[in-house]
Image (tube, grey):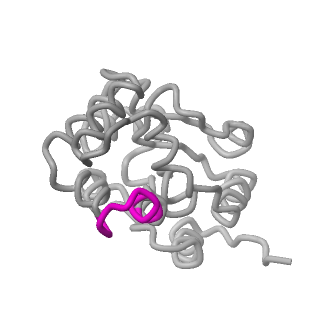
Amino acid sequence: MDWGGVMTTSLFASFAAFDRASGLADGTVKQAFRTDPEARAALDDLECGRATVAQFEERFAAVLGLDSGDGLALRLFSGVGPDDAMLDAVEAFRAAGVRTGLLSNSWADESYDRGRFATLFDVLVISGEEGMRKPDPRIYELAVERMGLAAQELVFVDDIGGNLKVPRAMGIHTVLHVDAATTLAELQDVLGVQLPAAA
């Protein structure tokens, strides 16, 4: 499982809220991360552990034309919260015997709420701790190795289509996450595990 945007609410909705709160045009942050070389380089360096949060904030604030980057990372993600349906489902899959793992692009010192990690995941692969990030093929290979299963036995869920191309080519079944209901319906079918009905 990816984390941000899969096990949480939408990152892009949080970015849109930041745009509005900062007086930026709609889609400014999203487009910067997608198309601006400096923004992409700043994010790559942060998520591969080559830069601190403060260094990222300074660089990305300059891309956005903001006077200060102080607290920028926190403000970008302030609208992100847990997706309880996804969290509960992954716990249920694991309790049913499915081996589970996290493969996330994120900085090593990010304040994940790790309180449920012990019941959610058997394996953790976090880009900032590994020095590489999706879609680098090496990070998927590392995830497969740690999962201890053949690629063809694995399913990977991500909310960004570009992060699914490499694992699909490796033989991993991929799911583009749009919402919990659609993703969980597909996972139940692929894994052959039915989740308990919601109360």
Depth check, front residue: 168 or 46: 46
Q: Residue furthest right?
A: 199
Q: Is residue 150 above or below residue 55?
A: below
Depth check, front residue: 156 or 117: 117
Q: Position of residue 133 (x, y in %)?
A: 31, 37
The image quadrant of residue 47 is: top left
Q: Position of residue 59 (x, y in %)?
A: 26, 33
Q: What range of the chain is rendered magenta? A: 16-27
Q: Position of residue 55 (x, y in %)?
A: 33, 25
Q: Is residue 101 above or below residue 23?
A: above
Quadrant (top left, top right, bottom left, bottom right) of the C terminus: bottom right
Q: Residue at x 54, y 43 (%)?
A: 101
In the displayed structure image, the side of residue 119 where residue 105 appears, left or right: left
The image quadrant of residue 134 is: top left
Check if residue 39 falls in the magenta segment. no
In the displayed structure image, the side of residue 34 where residue 51 appears, left or right: right
Q: Is residue 48 above or below residue 166?
A: above
Check if residue 24 falls in the magenta segment. yes
Q: Residue at x 80, y 77 (%)?
A: 198
Depth check, front residue: 98 or 73: 73
Q: Residue furthest front?
A: 67
Q: Is residue 20 above or below residue 166?
A: below
Q: Residue at x 35, y 55 (%)?
A: 172
Q: Residue at x 45, y 43 (%)?
A: 103
Q: Position of residue 188 (x, y in %)?
A: 59, 71
